[in-house]
Image (cartoon, grey):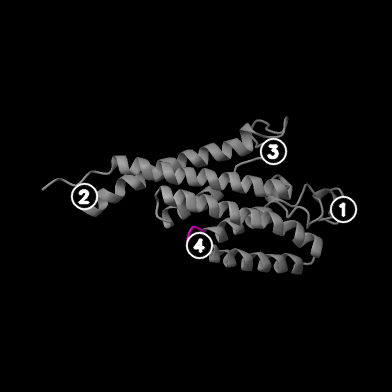
Amino acid sequence: MGARAKAIFPLALVIGVLSYLWTEFSLNFTFHWVTVSGTDLPGAVGVPQNFHLILPTAFIAWGLFFAAGGDNAAFGKIFLASLFGTVAALVTIPLAYKSAAFPEFWGIALWVGVFAFILVMILIAGDWYYVAGTFPAFAAVFLWWVATGMDGWAPAGADVDLDGAGAGTATGLGAFGGLVSTPWAWVWFDTFVTLICGLVLGLISGKLAALLTPKPKEA
């Protein structure tokens, strides 16, 4: 094994193991361990509670941690970026659906544009603000909002006639045929918590890899 491979292998190994553990933990947490009572039947998955973990979202913050330097300073940068980006989305969503309700999209587009402008303008505050991290965090909230049915903007599933058989036949508008339909405020909270989980995973993976990486031999 070459010197470059020896340096990369410990980090790759640690990230691989932690990715397995995070995937196993987050999916079981959301669909088996913390579900609506009576819905986790044998051979099936349960209906997630409003608070749940979002498997892919953690990888966003994990990657941003290393993109920002992979050290303690990077942890602080991405924590603040996650806070600024997700709070901006939290404010954007109600402004968007109150400006233009279902099925119009211009309200969403307008307020996303406004807050994208604001997030970039905050750069004038100094180098502590990492805009390359705020944008993915901002987008992560909208990604999960869309995936879980765009609560607030879209009608509730029970009010939508999707199959022509009359209102009340739809299970919801979220992922898994409406299984994951989440109030928009919880979308923000779940996304923020999961981003921080990913950030912690990044810090742990960096620290463990440093311990396992062979030290250069002294001349």
For the residue pair 5 and 51, the one nearer the viewer reads as 51
**Residues packed near mark 1 inside 10 Å, few (<14), some (14 to 19) or many (20 plus):** few
User: In this rendering, does residue 8 appear at all?
Assistant: yes
For the residues labelled 4 and 2, the Cα–Cα distance comes to: 43 Å
Q: Earlier in the sequence, mark 3 or mark 4?
A: 3
User: Label 4 sits on what residue type?
Assistant: Gly
For the residue pair 56 and 44, the one nearer the viewer reads as 56
**Residues packed near mark 2 inside 10 Å, few (<14), some (14 to 19) or many (20 plus):** few
Query: Which disc, if any, is residue 49?
Result: 3
For the residue pair 35 and 151, the one nearer the viewer reads as 151
**Callout count:** 4
Q: Earlier in the sequence, mark 4 or mark 2?
A: 2
**Which residue shows up at 88% across the image and 51% down it?**
167
Which mark is nearer the camera, 4 or 2?
A: 4
Q: Position of residue 158 (x, y in %)?
A: 83, 48
Identify the residue under disc 2: 1
Identify the residue under disc 1: 165
Which mark is nearer the camera, 1 or 3?
A: 3
User: Label 3 sits on what residue type?
Assistant: Gln
Which mark is nearer the camera, 3 or 4?
A: 4
Query: Which disc, if any, is residue 126?
Result: 4
**Which residue shows up at 73% across the image and 53% down it?**
149
Which mark is nearer the camera, 2 or 3?
A: 3
- Which span of residues is magenta-colored? 126-131
Mark 3: secondary structure: loop
For the residues labelled 2 and 1, the Cα–Cα distance comes to: 64 Å
- Horizontal side of 161 relative to 32 (left or right) equals right
For the residues labelled 1 and 3, the Cα–Cα distance comes to: 28 Å
Q: Quadrant of residue 85?
A: bottom right
Dominant secondary-structure state across the stretch colored magenta: loop
Callouts 1 and 3 close, C-beta under 8 Å: no
